[in-house]
Each structure stands twice: as C-alpha cells, then as structure tokens.
Amino acid sequence: MNKRDFLKNSVLAGTGIFATAMGTGHARSFLADDVPYTPALGGYHLDPLPYAYNALEPYIDEKTMKLHHDIHHQGYVTGLNKATDAVAAAIAANDYSLIKHWERELAFHGAGHFLHAIFWSIMGPSAGKRSAELDSAISRDFGSFDNFKKYFVASATAVEGSGWGILAYEPTAGKLVVLQAEKHSSLSQWTSIPLLVVDVWEHAYYLNYQNKRKDYVEAFFNVINWEEVSKRYELAMS
C-alpha cells in the first residue's frame, strides 16, 4: 500500500469499516430531520467491534462500550450518510441554499465516524509491542516514551469541552505531533495523519470515571494496541 492509498483507506483499516461515497443516483430531495432516514446503497457503515464489549475491562467497561459503539458511533454514521445524500441531492438539483449547513454536518459526522473507527482499531485486550521505528520516533520527537505519555495525557485531559487527543505524523516536518481536537473537526492540522486517538467526550468515560478525565486517559494506556499504532506509523512513513 502506498501513501496515497493509506491516506484514503487506512483511517478505517483494522476494523473492517470502509466508506464509499454515494452517487447522485441515490440522492434524496427531501431530508427533513423528523423523517426516518435509511442510507442509500453504498453509504457509510458501522461494523461490529473487533473484540468483545467486555474485552477492555477493567479499564473501559462493557456498558460504556455498548453505548459508545452501538449508539454514539452509529449516530455519526447515520448523520454522515444523511449529509452525504443531502449534498448529492443539492448537486443534482443545482440548489445550494443549504450547503453551509450540510458541509458542517459532513465535517462533524464524518470526523466522528473516522476518528471512532481509528479509536476501536488502536485498542484491544492485547497491548503488543511498539515497533523499533515508532519507539525511535517517539524518543526523537518527545525525548522519551515517558515524556510522550505525560504530554499526551496532559493534552487530552485539557481539551476544552468535548473532543479528542491525537498522536499524529506530520509529514511536512517529518515528525510526530500531539494534537487536540475540539468536537471532532476543530484545531486539527490538515496534513497530519492520525496514528493514535483517544475519545474524551464524556460519553466515552462518564459511567465509570465520572468527571475524572485524567484517570480515564491514564487507564486508556493499558488498552492501546501498539502493534496497530506501529503499523499505522510505518504506513504513514512509506
């Protein structure tokens, strides 16, 4: 897989979740919020988790995983399909009067879907080992793994409101960076390739950790699948 393929597809690799944009032939002209919505054939889909709901206990509990994956993530998939269909309908009808609204919906629900897909894939009941290449890059760019962990935990804990903590590869400078994302689609660096993400919306941790976000982010390090993170880094570098 080359870097172009990686940028296009690897966001969803490892979970079996793949997205295909809908064509205008599936466009709907009426998409009121109170009308039940079924995505057209070829839309975005949510696959089951690649492990059991209770596989990450005691760090992330089964009830939270069910609510988070089955309800919250599914909501982003549904919203993304709806917005994608609405934009296709606007193109078909040459009517862009609501395009600002639907572009915002695309950004919000699309980022929510793609980041969650990465989130499920970079966790697991088996931590594995970081590759030598990833370890070297972490030491180069943060001084040590301990420095990186402290930085990542502090950054994710300090996200204002709801959002994400992200370890990414920034190809312009050729280095690893830690980023914050408010909501899903703000404060990101456009060229950066996410390698490791943690969801710090309250729905990701409140049942078990209440308002103790830092405790949750610290616990998250016990369920990181470093082999998957290493694979993502190697693909980003290829």
Image (tube, rainbow, N blue to C red):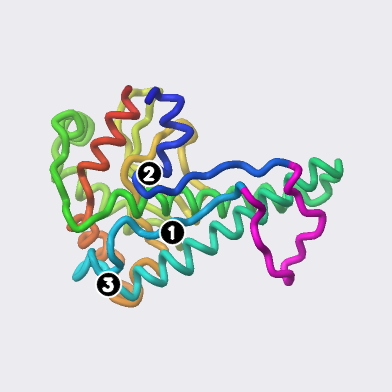
Q: Name the residue under label 3.
A: 61
Q: From the viewer's perspective, is 133 left or right of 19?
A: left
CA distance separating discs 2 and 3? 26 Å
Marks 3 and 2: in contact by CB < 8 Å? no
Q: From the viewer's perspective, is 204 left or right of 186?
A: left
Against 60, residue 220 (above or below) is above
Q: Position of residue 79 (x, y in %)?
A: 61, 58
At x 45% / y 32%, what residue is drawn?
Answer: 7
Instruction: Kindly identify the amino acid type of the residue bearing the numbered disc 2.
Output: Leu
At x 57% / y 53%, what residue is drawn?
Answer: 108
> For the residue labelled by badge 2, is the local secondary structure a helix, a strand or a loop?
strand
> For the residue labelled by badge 1, is the local secondary structure a helix, a strand or a loop?
loop
At x 57% / y 42%, what residue is drawn?
Answer: 20
Q: Where is residue 103 in the image (x, y as percent from the top left)?
A: 67, 47
Residue 38 lies in the magenta stretch: yes
At x 40% / y 48%, what residue is drawn?
Answer: 16
Q: Mark 2 points at which residue?
A: 179
Q: Where is residue 219 in the image (x, y as percent from the top left)?
A: 21, 62
Image depth: mark 3 or mark 1 in front: 3
Marks 1 and 3: in contact by CB < 8 Å? no
Q: In which quarter of the image is the N terminus?
A: top left
Q: Mark 1 points at which residue?
A: 160
Query: Which is nearer the N-term, disc 3 or disc 1?
Result: 3
Instruction: Kindly identify the amino acid type of the residue bearing the numbered disc 1.
Output: Glu
- How crowded pointer 3 is (Cα within 10 Å; few <14, some 14-19, many 20+) is rated as some
Query: Which is nearer the N-term, disc 2 or disc 1?
Result: 1
The image quadrant of residue 76 is bottom right
Q: Quadrant of the C terminus?
A: top left
Instruction: Kindly identify the amino acid type of the residue bearing the numbered disc 3.
Output: Asp
Please give the range of residues in magenta: 24-41
